[in-house]
Amino acid sequence: MLISLLYAQIDSVATQPAKQSSIVGFLPIIIMFVILYLLIFRPQQKKQKAVLKMRSGLQKNEKVVTNGGIIGTIYSIKGDVVVLKVADNIKIEVIKSAIANKMK
């Protein structure tokens, strides 16, 4: 009789923390995803928006650098193609997505 009461108490005590620990067990995973979003994804999205805004605002006679490291002045813009003047009488065509940044 005493042993059965002891087992009943152990079972009731053992089930209560299990319910709480399942919620507490997911808490570190949720916190990890929040930190991952705040430290990695959000800044990356901000940077990508800034680059897209810069590319859409390109104008003639601005100095730019391509992803390949070519420095040139924008001669003309035709849709997604930008004609760069690299030197006297030397012009090359690159797509807008190949432009890394503007030079000041």
Image (cartoon, helix red, strand yellow):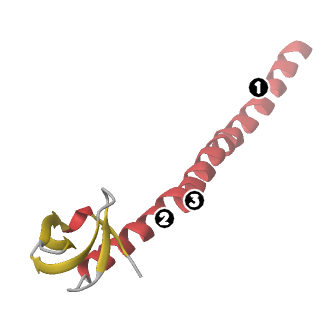
Position of residue 2 relative to residue 16, above or below, is above
- Residue type highlighted by circle 3: Leu
What is the CA distance from the residue labelled 1 to the residue labelled 2?
46 Å
Which residue in the structure is indicated by mark 1? 11
Which of 2 and 70 lies nearest the eye of the viewer? 70
Which residue in the structure is indicated by mark 2? 42
Q: Position of residue 68 (x, y in %)?
A: 30, 56
Instruction: Indicate the quadrant where residue 76 lies.
Output: bottom left
Residue in view at x 47 percent, y 59 percent: 41
Q: Are marks 3 and 2 in contact (CB under 8 Å)?
A: yes
Q: Position of residue 71 (x, y in %)?
A: 31, 68
> For the residue labelled by badge 1, is the local secondary structure a helix, a strand or a loop?
helix
- Residue type highlighted by circle 2: Arg
Which residue in the structure is indicated by mark 3? 39
Residue in view at x 83 percent, y 27 percent: 9
Q: Which quadrant, please, contains the N terminus?
A: top right
> For the residue labelled by badge 3, is the local secondary structure a helix, a strand or a loop?
helix
Q: Residues within 10 Å of mark 1 (few under 14, many from 20)?
A: few
What is the CA distance from the residue labelled 3 to the residue labelled 1?
43 Å
Q: Earlier in the sequence, mark 1 or mark 2?
A: 1
What is the CA distance from the residue labelled 3 to the residue labelled 2?
7 Å
- Residue type highlighted by circle 1: Asp
Residue in view at x 75 percent, y 37 percent: 17
Q: Residues within 10 Å of mark 2 (few under 14, many from 20)?
A: few
Which of 63 and 51 lies nearest the eye of the viewer? 63
Q: Residues within 10 Å of mark 3 (few under 14, many from 20)?
A: few
Position of residue 66 relative to residue 22, above or below, is below
Residue in view at x 9 percent, y 75 percent: 79
Is 77 situated left or right of 68 in this image? left
Is 9 situated left or right of 51 in this image? right
> For the residue labelled by badge 2, is the local secondary structure a helix, a strand or a loop?
helix
